[in-house]
Amino acid sequence: MGPAITESLLRNYIASSCSKLSDYFLINGNHQMWLLAADFCLDDKGMINNTCAISLIPIDEEPSGIVSRIKSAIPKDLKKTRDITKEIIEALGDKRTFHFVFVLDGHRKIFGDPNIRQESATKYVQDMCSTLTQMGCPPKIYKPFKKLLQESKAKSFNVSLLADTLVFSAMISFVTACLIRESGAKLIGLFPDRDKIIEWCDGVYSDLVCCL
């Protein structure tokens, strides 16, 4: 399910020959160390859509310098910013960065019929964990998946959160694949906003990124 999302995104990206992204890598493709920053807007009644934004940032200076540069231009969460200043516009248009924005519509239906949704989600987790066990997954890496497996057996299992986590991890996998394909990236650091997706099951999202 997760891998299918990543593969679909990659197929569409390759087929579309996205000129804006190609132009971006013409300027920044020589960098081999990158930061991926991400933020979410899910279930916010004050917003029109459920969205996820992922930003590509080359490490062309000390990470602390990158953070200071961005914070000086965008001091507050953009979702809570009413007045878009010239500095914010210039920061978002900086040719050193590239922004993906995904509008999520119906992604929580990936487990099918609402009547068997939880059963389907639980089976998905069990099958995934079984595959990892058969592959001889090291205990340290398997630990968050074991916690996810335990969660999946509970009556209160949060299927919507699983869907959010799978889709977000697939999007990060897609962006990571683009980076490796276009720039030969050797180091990619993930810096998502703290959220239920990120903290759930000991941060299993980051391990899902590698699996998807």
Image (cartoon, grey):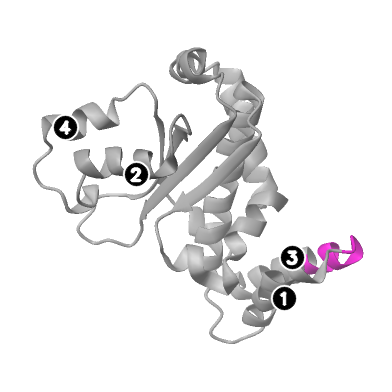
Residue at screen point 39% across, 56% down? 193
Q: Is residue 24 above or below residue 110?
A: above
Dot 1 lies on which element?
helix
The mark lying in front, picked from 1 and 2, is 2
Please state the horizontal and vertical placement of residue 88, each as a whole percent of the image: 19, 35
Q: Nearer the viewer, residue 89 or 35?
A: 35
How crowded pointer 4 is (Cα within 10 Å; few <14, some 14-19, many 20+) is rated as: few
Gap between marks 3 and 2, in whole Å?
Answer: 30 Å
| N-terminal-most mark, 2 or 4 | 2
Gap between marks 4 and 3, in whole Å?
Answer: 42 Å
Please state the horizontal and vertical placement of residue 64, each as a whole percent of the image: 38, 45
Dot 4 lies on which element?
helix
Dot 3 lies on which element?
helix
Instruction: Give the number of the disc on residue 87.
Output: 4
How crowded pointer 3 is (Cα within 10 Å; few <14, some 14-19, many 20+) is rated as: few
The mark lying in front, picked from 1 and 4, is 4
| N-terminal-most mark, 1 or 4 | 4
Task: State the extent of the magenta-drawn residues as a range.
Answer: 129-136
Please state the horizontal and vertical placement of residue 3, each as a whole percent of the image: 69, 47
Residue at screen point 55% across, 45% down? 189
Q: Amino acid at mark 4?
A: Glu
| N-terminal-most mark, 1 or 2 | 2
Residue carrying label 1: 146
Residue carrying label 3: 141
